[in-house]
Amino acid sequence: MMEIRKVLTIAGSDSGGGAGIQADLKTITALGGFGMSVVTALTAQNTLGVQGIHEIPVEFVKLQFNSVAGDIGIDAAKTGMLASSEIIGAVAEMIRTWKVTRLVVDPVMVAKGGAKLIRDDAKETLVRELLPLACVVTPNTPEAEELAGIPIRSLDDMKRAAVRINAMGPRHVYIKGGHMVGGDALDVLFDGSNFHELSALRIATKDTHGTGCTLSSAIATGLAQEMTVLEAVKRAKEYITWAIRFALHIGEGNGPTNHLAPVFRERSHGAYVRELKSAVEKMEEMPSNL
């Protein structure tokens, strides 16, 4: 029996289904993992924005974590929306208690529509408590600016910010360049010594709700499957590019990415390969004197 790797998402619920734990669980499943969740907040949310946030009590956040880890186990985890300093501290405590080393931290600060998803005092706790536990931290450029304290306008700026964030403790820093203007969608991965640039065609669409959640959970799934960080990031980059390319125009605002598009692509490719192989085998069986 094939062993399925178990991936935990520690994040907020998106009632609209495009981001948060809903996006995470779809991604983990699409990439062959088993998804579990610790819900940190409930949001009233749709493609137009966030209408309300209800934080889960800290003790219940910890109870969810202990329930999952104590029975099922955790091969990798990712964090998303952690709205308060108290919740961040509790999550960091649980990460240390259960010795989760394959941790992806998505420093969610602002929703696509502009709503703040983290309290002002929580950023310091995030930097102090959670970043040092991260195998990979995945800020977009506005989040990287906030963490590094510098403006980001170029590739060199991204690299400078990555160095600054790396000094805060995470083993790898992956800065996403989707918010940059013009050119391809260029990201930077820094491992403390070397930079890796990952580029993909920039797709003109407003339907990009949940891209950060999707990418970070894709990386976590790769780590759970014992990929290297670079391998996990490359696959996640390809996955999110296809999910954006075939994004779903749902609602009146920013629609969600299509988490199943890469799966259908792989299935189509697999069917094509099988048909091609069958055709070749039939040709080989034909008499040579024809």
Image (tube, helix red, strand yellow):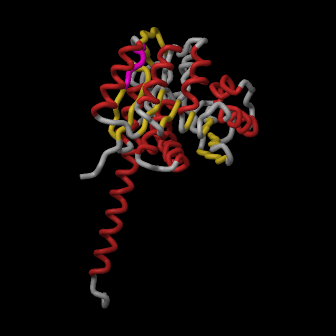
Please give the name of the residue rendered at 64% of the width and 48% of the height, measured from the top-left corner: 196
Please give the name of the residue rendered at 29% of the width and 35% of the height, measured from the top-left corner: 72
Q: Outermost residue toward the left?
A: 1
17 or 201: nearer the eye? 17
Relative height, residue 47 to residue 261 (above, below) = above
Please give the name of the residue rendered at 45% of the width and 8% of the height, measured from the top-left corner: 52
Q: Main secondary structure of the magenta part?
A: strand
- Report how many numbered discs are placed on residues in the image: 0
Q: Is residue 71 magenta?
A: no
Relative height, residue 116 to residue 238 (above, below) = above
228 or 66: nearer the eye? 66
Magenta stretch in the rendered image: 38-44
Res 258 quadrant in image: top left
Asked if one can make out residue 246 in the rendered structure from this viewpoint, the answer is: no
Residue 126 image offset from top left, x and y in percent: 57, 22
243 or 54: nearer the eye? 54
Residue 4 image offset from top left, x and y in percent: 31, 45
- Using residue 80 as the reference point, say whether residue 285 is left or right of it: left
The quarter of the picture where the C terminus appears is bottom left
Asked if one can make out residue 92 in the rendered structure from this viewpoint, the answer is: yes
Q: Outermost residue toward the bottom?
A: 289
Residue 110 image offset from top left, x and y in percent: 57, 19
Please give the name of the residue rendered at 32% of the width and 63% of the height, measured from the top-left corner: 275
Residue 77 image offset from top left, x and y in percent: 43, 34
Res 76 quadrant in image: top left
